[in-house]
Image: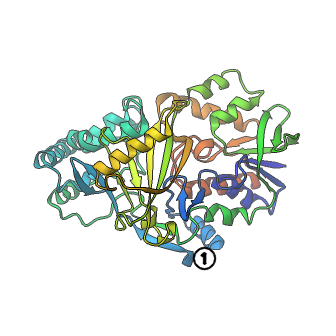
Amino acid sequence: MIVVLGAGLTGLSAAYHLQDRAQVELYEREQAPGGLCRSAVKDGFTFDLTGHLLHLRRPEIKELVAALIPEERFFKIDRRAFIFSHDVLTPYPFQVNTHGLPAEVVAECLTGFVEALMSGQVTPEEVERISFKQWVVRTFGSGIALHFMIPYNEKMWLADLEEVTCDWVSWSIPRPTLQDVVDGALGISRKAFGYNPSFLYPKLGGIQILPSALASRVRGVTCGTDVQRVDTLRRTITVRDASGAGREIPYEHLISTIPLPRLLSMAHGLPGWMPDAARKLRHVSVVNLNIGLERQVHPDKHWIYFPEKEFVFYRVGFPASFTPAAAPPGCSSLYVEISRRPGEPYDEDLLYEQARAGLQRAGIIHPGERFATRATFFIDPAYVIYDETRRRLLPAIHEALISRGIHSIGRYGGWYYNSMEDSLADGRSLAQEILAGRLPVALGQTPGRA
């Protein structure tokens, strides 16, 4: 028996790729599958649990998605992302689009990049030793670091960037050439940068249609069932459904996609150091404010980054620019992302007031403008913090779990930073390893692997 915990993309993918050759049962705590990849409809507006865009690079995952959902149900979109700083809106990414910023800012960014270039690139060996903050300065120079990279990431991670490692940046933060930076300073940039210059988004139904389509192909999905205990010695789990009824289920392999610290907190029979290790794994939470407006706002923009401290949010997106079906005719919507430390209380109404002030300050909404609707999602965990403790503990944690037939994978099970494609690939890869009779190494620690 193979038991899967969590019906997000990773868990669904694992069950889907296992079910024809193994007995699989999948349990999900929520009442519907999807995990973080869910959508909600309120007053005619469709809101995702913050921005979810589908970037497909692997042929096998492209084939999987195509088999689940016809291509014509997606829009293929070229990214139109921006940064608001110094009262100026510039295209993303910042490092190759400084034209339009104050002249002294452009000069600092350009000269800083040249100085960084002359000092030499960060070597693979140095990536293992230096902090994210050091990597930013060494890679982009002091100007780009000062005016975007450091303030934006401090706002999002809510952590000292000297404590954050840089082993997650290679796939998500592009390093330009000198010509790219000079062209961007002169306003002649013509090149798309980053891992997401184009993406797919559903025409109807929000991002929820992807996990829903996958769940419809998976047998043995049980929602509304929470895991209470994992006995790693007897290889059983104890679950409880909405009625309060509990039962014990044996497993040969347990595939867990629930947050790794939560799994460790309920697992019994593990080495004594592991519960304490779970408490040392760090993350940030996100309060996702969603706002419906009775007019169109920025139909030509997909999202905007806000690095400056005066704005409570770090990013604002415009779902109706992905698809007009995200809002009623003549309307539009916003998703507003605000980082919080785990366990830190917040006043929802106050956050909306602060968001309103910032949105007005940025010219996105009008003074006193009425919100047609609003919906709030709290995402916890949201982003894993890469630090030395994580780097030191994670391999040993996964090794101990695998020795007991437990495979903790996916964004939160693997405790890493990934995309939806990576989540689907994690489930597929582990299923192949199990079916081949191999004891897999820890998956989900290296983004972008095949």
Residue at 43% across / 37% down in the picture?
157
Q: Is residue 126 left or right of residue 199?
A: left
Residue 273 place in picture, x, y as percent: 66, 21
Q: Residues within 10 Å of mark 1 (few under 14, many from 20)?
A: few
Quarter holding residue 335 = bottom left
Q: Is residue 229 above or below residue 148?
A: above
Image color mode: rainbow
Amino acid on which the number 1 mark rests in the picture? Pro
Q: How many marks?
A: 1
Q: Find disc 1 in the rendering and name its residue.
A: 70
Residue 25 place in picture, x, y as percent: 81, 52
Q: Is residue 58 left or right of residue 300?
A: right
Residue 22 place in picture, x, y as percent: 82, 57
- Image quadrant holding the C terminus, namely bottom right
Residue 437 place in picture, x, y as percent: 77, 51
- Residue 142 seen in render: yes
- Residue 313 seen in render: no
Residue at 74% across / 51% down in the picture?
434
